[in-house]
Amino acid sequence: MLEAIVNLILNLLKPKIKPKEIISPIIRRELDSASIVSIIEAKFPELPRQFIFMSDKTKQLCDIEDIEAFLEQDRTNHIEFIAEKFDCDDFTFRLMGQFSTPEWASIAKGIVWSDKHALMAFIDTNLDFWYLEPQNDKIQSKLENWQGSEIRVIIM
């Protein structure tokens, strides 16, 4: 009985950790998958159409600032890189999973595989295609040399 009372008191004294509220993007536009594919094809004319996969019929677009705000909360980029255990594909799948909430699920974002690397990408309100490096949260318009030079697959 005494043990139960002590446990009850200890539980009452524990600080209640309130989960962080998920930042919701402000949806600015919606495009059908054909329009998204057209944007990707314009950016990567050498990429055969069969290597562009769309998961939904429509995608929503938000501003780059919404993505940056999300990244401020996410901790994926703080995980230690471990070659062949937790490397580029694992960082990419982890960050994509973090975005897989009802608030973010329909945003035009996805996974990109190059000839050397896996990372994320998204299309913003201005219809610009951006790479998102999950290991450091860098948003960039072009691949850096270490990330490869040829896109092999895009899944959105």
Image (spheres, rainbow, N blue to C red):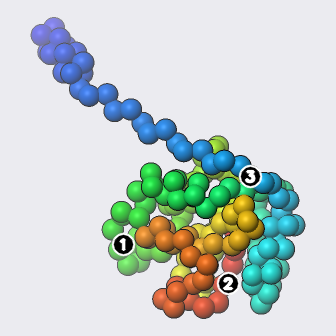
Residue at mark 1 to residue at mark 3: CA–CA distance: 35 Å
> Which quadrant holds residue 60?
bottom right
How packed is label 1: few (under 14 Cα within 10 Å), some, or many (20 or more)? some
Q: Amino acid at mark 2?
A: Arg
On the image, the x and y values in percent for residue 83 come to 38, 78
How packed is label 2: few (under 14 Cα within 10 Å), some, or many (20 or more)? some
Residue 130 seen in the figure: yes
**How many marks can you see?**
3
SS under mark 2: strand
The residue shown at (44%, 39%) is 20
On the image, the x and y values in percent for residue 61 come to 72, 57
Q: Earlier in the sequence, mark 3 or mark 2?
A: 3
On the image, the x and y values in percent for residue 110 come to 65, 65
Instruction: Specify whether 16 is left or right of 148.
Output: left
Q: Is residue 78 above or below residue 3?
A: below
SS under mark 1: loop
Residue furthest out toward the left: 2
According to the picture, the residue beneath numbered tag 3 turns out to be 28
Q: Amino acid at mark 3?
A: Arg
Residue at mark 2 to residue at mark 1: CA–CA distance: 23 Å
Q: Amino acid at mark 1?
A: Phe
> Which quadrant holds residue 35?
bottom right
Residue at mark 3 to residue at mark 2: CA–CA distance: 29 Å
Residue 91 seen in the figure: no
The residue shown at (52%, 53%) is 70
On the image, the x and y values in percent for residue 8 come to 22, 15
Q: Which mark is residue 152?
A: 2
Q: Which mark is residue 81?
A: 1
Q: Earlier in the sequence, mark 1 or mark 3?
A: 3
Along the line of sight, which residue is nearer the eye, 117 or 126?
126
Instruction: Specify whether 36 is left or right of 136.
Output: right
